[in-house]
């Protein structure tokens, strides 16, 4: 079991933070314990699940969690993945290093089913690249 706890925080814990949790788990390969949460809970977005499965990562067993559920955990790092979460991020009594990257919300995608799927894939790729770089920088 790893001793590095990472929290990925988003508004609704349905898309971006779920995708980031999946990739951080994959890239850290057991070197960290990854959690994701939202300031609200909107349920795990089925399109996020489908988009991740296309890339070989199954997040279908993830749950949508409220940040308050993790108050007792001493996080080493907190990553906010949207500006709204960064602005409203609760203050944890923690020494956690804070990181922020604002990703577009694929749940707000509009257009044909193909256009919406393409927007989910674009955001997935942005988050994948960020997570790969994050792990490479923090887990030598």
Image (cartoon, rainbow, N blue to C red):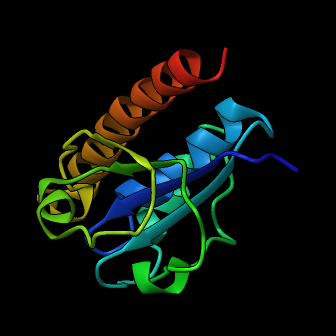
Q: Along the line of sight, which residue is nearer the eye, 25 or 47?
A: 25
Task: Name the spot of residue 113 as percent of width and height, x first.
Answer: 27, 58
> Is 123 on the left or on the right of 27, as rendered?
left
Q: Determine if residue 84 is in view.
A: yes
Q: Residue furthest right?
A: 1
Residue 127 spot, x, y in % from top left:
39, 36
Viewer-proximal residue, 24 or 123? 24
Q: In the image, 1: left or right of 27?
A: right
- The image position of residue 38, as x and y in percent, is 36, 74
Task: Indicate the quadrant where residue 124 lies.
Answer: top left
Which image quadrant for residue 139? top right
Say whether residue 103 is left or right of residue 99.
left
- Location of residue 96 with respect to 14 vertically, above or below: above
Q: Is residue 54 visible?
A: no
Question: Where is residue 137 drawn, in percent x and y?
Answer: 51, 16
Say above or below: 128 vs 70: above
Q: Looking at the rendering, in which quadrant would you find the C terminus?
A: top right
Question: Would you say 96 lies left or right of 114 here?
Answer: right
Q: Which residue occupies 24% across, 64% down?
A: 107
* Quadrant of the rendered image containing residue 97: top left
Q: Who is closer to the viewer here, 96 or 87? A: 96
Task: Identify the residue shown where x is 35% and y is 84%.
Answer: 42
Q: How many marks?
A: 0
Q: Residue 42 versus residue 97: which sits nearer the camera?
A: 97
- Give the residue drawn at x 65%, y 68%: 60
């Amino acid at each position: 079991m790893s001793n590095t706890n990472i929290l990925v925080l988003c508004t609704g814990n349905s898309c971006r933070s779920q995708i980031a949790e999946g990739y951080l788990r994959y890239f850290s390969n057991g070197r960290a314990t990854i959690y994701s949460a939202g300031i609200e809970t909107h349920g795990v977005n089925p399109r996020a699940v489908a988009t991740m499965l296309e890339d070989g990562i199954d997040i279908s067993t993830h749950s949508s969690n409220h940040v308050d559920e993790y108050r007792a955990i001493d996080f080493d790092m907190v990553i906010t993945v949207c500006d709204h979460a960064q602005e409203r991020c609760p203050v944890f009594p923690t020494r956690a290093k804070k990181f922020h990257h604002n990703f577009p919300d694929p749940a707000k995608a509009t257009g044909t089913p193909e256009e919406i799927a393409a927007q989910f894939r674009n955001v997935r790729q942005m988050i994948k690249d960020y997570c790969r770089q994050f792990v490479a920088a923090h887990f030598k």
